[in-house]
Image (cartoon, rainbow, N blue to C red):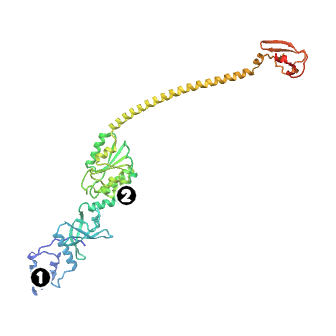
Amino acid sequence: MTSRRRPGRPVQGGALDLFGGELFHATEAAGASRADAPVDPPPAVSEHPAGSVYDETGPAFPGASAESAVAVGTLTQTAKDLLEGALFPLWVRGEITDFKRHRNGHWYFCLRDGDAQVKCVVWSRDTRSIPASPDDGMQLAAFGQLSVYAARGEMQFIVRRMEAEGEGLWRKALDATIQRLTADGLLAPERKRRLPRYPRQVAVITSGSGAAFHDVVSVMKRRAPGVRVVLVPAAVQGPLATRELVAALEQVGRWGQADAVIFGRGGGGREDLWAFNDEAVARALAACPIPTISAVGHEIDTSVCDLVADLRAATPSAAAELAVGSYDDAAAELRRAAQRLAGAVDTRLAAARERFGGAGRLLSHRGTRLVERRRTRMQALAGRLDALSPLATLARGFAVARTGDGRTAASIHQLGAGTPFDLLLRDGRVRAVAGESQPGTPESFLGPAEGAS
């Protein structure tokens, strides 16, 4: 449909070769007929500025007669070349109507105001540079080239860029991206990861030539000189930014040696920061296996990556402060912790001494009471044993007979007549010889007087 316009060539009379050479071919074909059969030019031709050319070419002038009629394709293509050559690309403001998205990726719509309208097209290759498709009724400014669709002879405005009033297209694209990421749970607070307090290596994904990386390094050197900072360079704006940012995140994930990732750039305009609102970049950031800090633009800027990252920082310098703890702060915290620990140990020791002292006193008291109870019990047992002792029986006036071999005689059968034995009394021993034995109970041999004695 498009073609490169060939510049017109001057001919006699100052006219231009508007039909790409057909004028010269026609005059050559006419040959001598021009001189032999002069014909008056049609009024429309004679009044045209190029009428002097007709004076020389006669009816062979393209389109001047039925014999020299031009093809429809030639006409529309010439109109296309003339229109594109006469008007340079420009901005046009109007209202969107009849927007249609073709299956091949092209956009078709009309741009109109109160006086007129023009058909517009955005080729699929140019839609990538527009944040979102417009909606009917949206007021916007479109940048492009007025042209002719030669196959149909229709004038159309070929749009390459769009700027809606306010934040129209940008806000629409941003809201649609956030809605899809939210539906997939990538903005949920519970998926946010905690960053290590004292990382050993921090990866920084940003432009190698920008100020953001130098700001991060400066803060790192001041707060934690021992932390290694690794730059993963990527374009942060322009047509290559989206692809390079995704590739950088995937590279850091495959490397796996970083403890945290700072992802971002310094401030800029809306278009400069737009790569960090790209859905593919946001999903790559969410898929990164390492905790991430997003630091895009300045504090007033909030990008989709800020919402997806585990932590958001206002600036790259603030991200560096959040990524690493200060060695000075850590030393001061250790000193405070040591003081708290020493105080806690002293408190615990004092409490233990008090507790052990009380336990000792209680143990001593209980031991004393236990000993007293045991002594009382032993005394009672001793009294009972003493009451049951044969010696106590002897003290009450009884005697014990023992045979010559020292055994106690418990029966008369052990002491036959003439058998010597010992009679043990309370205060001594009497040697005796058994006489006649009389069987019976002890009570039968004790009379009242004897029992009383």
Q: Residues within 10 Å of mark 1 (few under 14, many from 20)?
A: few
Please tell me which residue is depicted at 21% across the width and 76% down the height of the picture.
76
SS at mark 2?
Answer: helix
Circles 2, 1 touching at the beta carbon (< 8 Å): no
The percent position of residue 163, horizontal first and vertical second, equals 23, 62
Q: CA distance from mark 2 to mark 1?
A: 67 Å
User: In this view of the protein, which residue sits in the foreground, 172 or 278?
Assistant: 172
Left or right placement of residue 133 versus residue 6 in this view: right
Q: Residue furthest front?
A: 448
Please tell me which residue is depicted at 29% across the width and 40% down the height of the picture.
222
Q: Quadrant of residue 12?
A: bottom left
User: In this view of the protein, which residue sits in the foreground, 197 or 159?
Assistant: 197
The percent position of residue 306, horizontal first and vertical second, equals 32, 52
Residue 118 visible in this rendered orientation of the protein: yes
Say whether disc 2 or disc 1 marks the residue closer to the N-terminus.
1
Please tell me which residue is depicted at 85% across the width and 18% down the height of the picture.
448
Left or right placement of residue 21 versus residue 369 in this view: left
User: In this view of the protein, which residue sits in the foreground, 245 or 447?
Assistant: 447
The percent position of residue 353, horizontal first and vertical second, equals 48, 27
Residue type highlighted by circle 2? Thr
Residue that label 2 marks: 182
Residue type highlighted by circle 1? Ala
SS at mark 1?
Answer: helix
Left or right placement of residue 357 versus residue 138 in this view: right
Q: Quadrant of residue 110?
A: bottom left
Residue that label 1 marks: 44
